[in-house]
Amino acid sequence: MDTITIPKGFKVTPEQFEQLADVEQLARMELTKNGELIIMSPTGGEAGEKNFNLYIDLGIWNRQTKLGKAFDSSTVFVLPNAARRSPDVSWILLERWNRLSEKEKQGFPPIAPDFVIELVSPSDLKNQRYEDLQAKMQEYLDNGVRLGWLIEPSSKIVEIYRVGQPVEILNNPQTLSGENILPGFILDLSEIF
């Protein structure tokens, strides 16, 4: 089989993106608002384990509170700006999720999550994509996300993104609070750092 090298800035239509997503199961893909196709390699062991711990913690809280729906990194959301994005971990308030039709819930949901987490992986650092992740976090806010955490495990830094506020940078925090978005949710970072 021939391999295809996709140049940075390669553009596809939303329809082509959906066709690619149906075929390409090994890579995570996103589509920017400008139609740029972003292909991310599968997660390595350490990043996968850290992501899993994030899922577990949010999932247990969500099962107990039943306040919303939690999603893993394989879920693609269609944001209001038409970008197709898949946060590492995300959550949507139940009443907002329930407004979607069954067809919208089964496909790429046309909704911005209320809460997102992006975990900086070793490959993100190696390929100098940290600034891209920061821009992605801002894009989430611009499209309706109310709270976002960009977690960089190797330097033990967390950037907190909130609507209408400057980014807050925490050095080596022990825990993170879900604030009023995820009431009562406290993330213990000992499994991440």
Image (cartoon, rainbow, N blue to C red):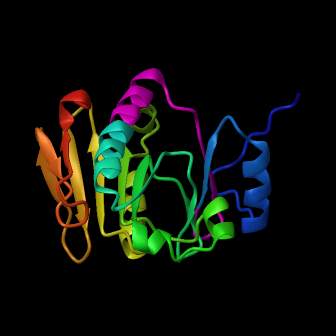
Kindly give the residue lying farthest to the top in the view shown: 45
Q: Please state if 12 lies on the left or on the right of 190 as rendered.
A: right
Q: Is residue 169 left or right of residue 10?
A: left
User: Is residue 106 depicted above or below 166 in this figure?
Assistant: above
Residue 21 lies, in percent from the top left, at 72, 50
Q: Residue at x 25, y 60 (%)?
A: 182
* Front in this rendered view, residue 53 or 18: 53
Q: Residue at x 26, y 74 (%)?
A: 163
Could you tell me which residue is drawn at 43 percent across and 32 percent down?
126
Residue 166 image point, x, y percent = 19, 69
Q: Is residue 49 magenta?
A: yes
Residue 13 in view (yes/no): no
- Image: 52 above or below 28: above
Tell me residue 181's x, y (percent): 25, 65
Asked whether 61 or 72 is in front, the reply is 61
Q: Give the magenta range.
A: 32-53
